[in-house]
Amino acid sequence: MQIHVYDTYVKANDGHTMHFDVFTAVKDDQKAVEYAKQWLASIGEENAVVTSRECSFCHSQSAPDNVIDEINKNGFYIYKMEGC
């Protein structure tokens, strides 16, 4: 399965920068932003500003089974990098 990676940088409530990728099965910029907002709300960061400027398409790639399973279940997978 090919997934689409959206590189995302947002400011957290306390002002630090959170860097994560949104992995999706469908290349849809608006859907990726919605997924980022959904995940941020789930961790108490619902006030973070996320637009296509903060969450932008980076590339497509293959994915391991655990990522594919999560995408099939929820529509997306969050790959946490810095400040998450």
Image: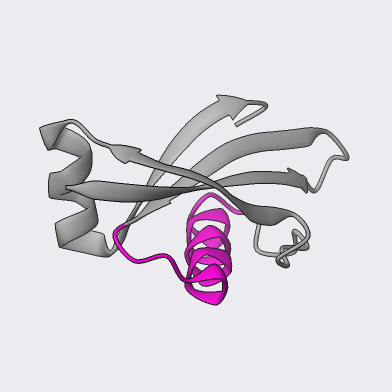
Q: From the viewer's perspective, is 71 left or right of 82?
A: left
* Quarter occupied by residue 72: bottom left
Residue 26 appears at what percent x and percent y? 34, 66
- In magenta, the rendered stretch is 25-44
Q: Establish if 65 lies above or below 5.
A: above
* Quarter occupied by residue 58: top right
Q: From the viewer's perspective, is 40 left or right of 45?
A: left
The residue sitting at 60% across, 54% down in the picture is 44
Name the foreground residue: 29 vs 35: 29
Q: Can residue 43 be found in the magenta stretch?
A: yes
Q: From the viewer's perspective, is 80 left or right of 9?
A: left
Q: Can residue 39 be found in the magenta stretch?
A: yes
The residue sitting at 25% across, 62% down in the picture is 74
Q: Residue furthest bottom?
A: 30
Residue 4 appears at what percent x and percent y? 40, 51
Q: Residue furthest right?
A: 15
Q: Establish if 30 lies above or below 58.
A: below
Q: From the viewer's perspective, is 47 left or right of 59?
A: right
